[in-house]
Amino acid sequence: MRESGEGTVWSIDLNADLGESFGAWRMGDDEAVLPWVSSANIATGAHAGDPLTAVRTLRWAKVRGVAPGAHPGWPDLAGFGRRSLVFSPDETYAIVLHQLGALQALARGEGLILHHVKLHGALYHQAADEAVYAEPVVEAIAAIDPALFVYCQTPSVLADQARRRGLRVVAEGFADRRYRPDGRLVPRTEPEALIRDPDEAGRQALALARRGAGESQTVATIGMHGDGIEAPRLARRVFEILTGAGVVIAPPDAAGA
């Protein structure tokens, strides 16, 4: 919700994980997803992505007026960053700091300022559950730019650590992932973890926007994955269902976060 001159406006952010191609490997269709989202999580070269792909995605985001963010993950190209790895706090800090700094430099080269950080894959979940990963992630974000929004599930250890450090947390739900009754995501190892039907994804996005994940937490941004062939069609349908219900799609800002 946001206040305007005409009263309360119901608004939410739509984010997508993009920029995950590298070299000859093509993942998704970023240019086709960007018209339907308000913020982009751009891969930073560890789990996927490369400098050229990042620059291209930043340029497309700039043309579309989409808020650019960093999408750091574990250095695990073979596993697409979805395997749980073990690193010390110092290693985690350096891994995340390196990725954020690299994308920040590329963004500045394109006349852009990074808007947010959303962790990828296993790092997203490990930092949500364990302080040993959440704390160095938060310190890396604060070292790069304490004004960056932190997209993450709430409640979580990462959200608590980020708020304690004075960072701005944006609670996230997912349009294309199924939830357990307790509000946690169904693991990808289970057959029904992903939602591939655009209409179902749109209905879930609208439900999340109205009541929050697990009916216990307001969601301010709704995430989608950009690496599947269905991603553009799914993103468009989610956008259509939300806007058809009167929801304004816009990235978080200092007043509305």
Image (tube, rainbow, N blue to C red):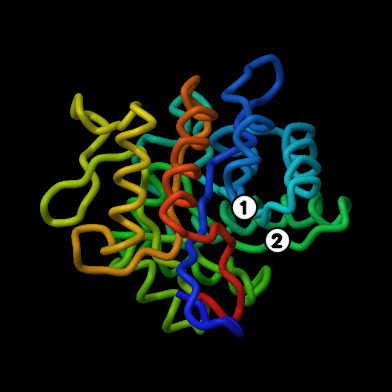
Q: Secondary structure at mark 1?
A: strand
> Looking at the picture, which amino acid does disc 1 mark?
Ala
Residue 168 sits above or below residue 198 on the image: below
* Residue found 19% across the figure and 58% down from its top: 214
- In which quadrant will I find the N terminus? bottom left
Question: Which is more toward the observer, 174 or 94?
Answer: 174
> Looking at the picture, which amino acid does disc 2 mark?
Leu
Question: Which is more toward the observer, 135 or 11?
Answer: 11
Image-based side of 102 in relation to 83, left or right: right
- Residue 115 position, x and y percent, is 66, 63
Name, please, the residue furthest toward the top: 24
Disc 1, disc 2: CB below 8 Å? yes
- Which numbered disc covers residue 114? 2
In space, the residues marked 1 and 2 are separated at their CA atoms by 7 Å
* Residue found 41% across the figure and 42% down from its top: 121
- Residue 120 position, x and y percent, is 47, 45
- Which numbered disc covers residue 70? 1
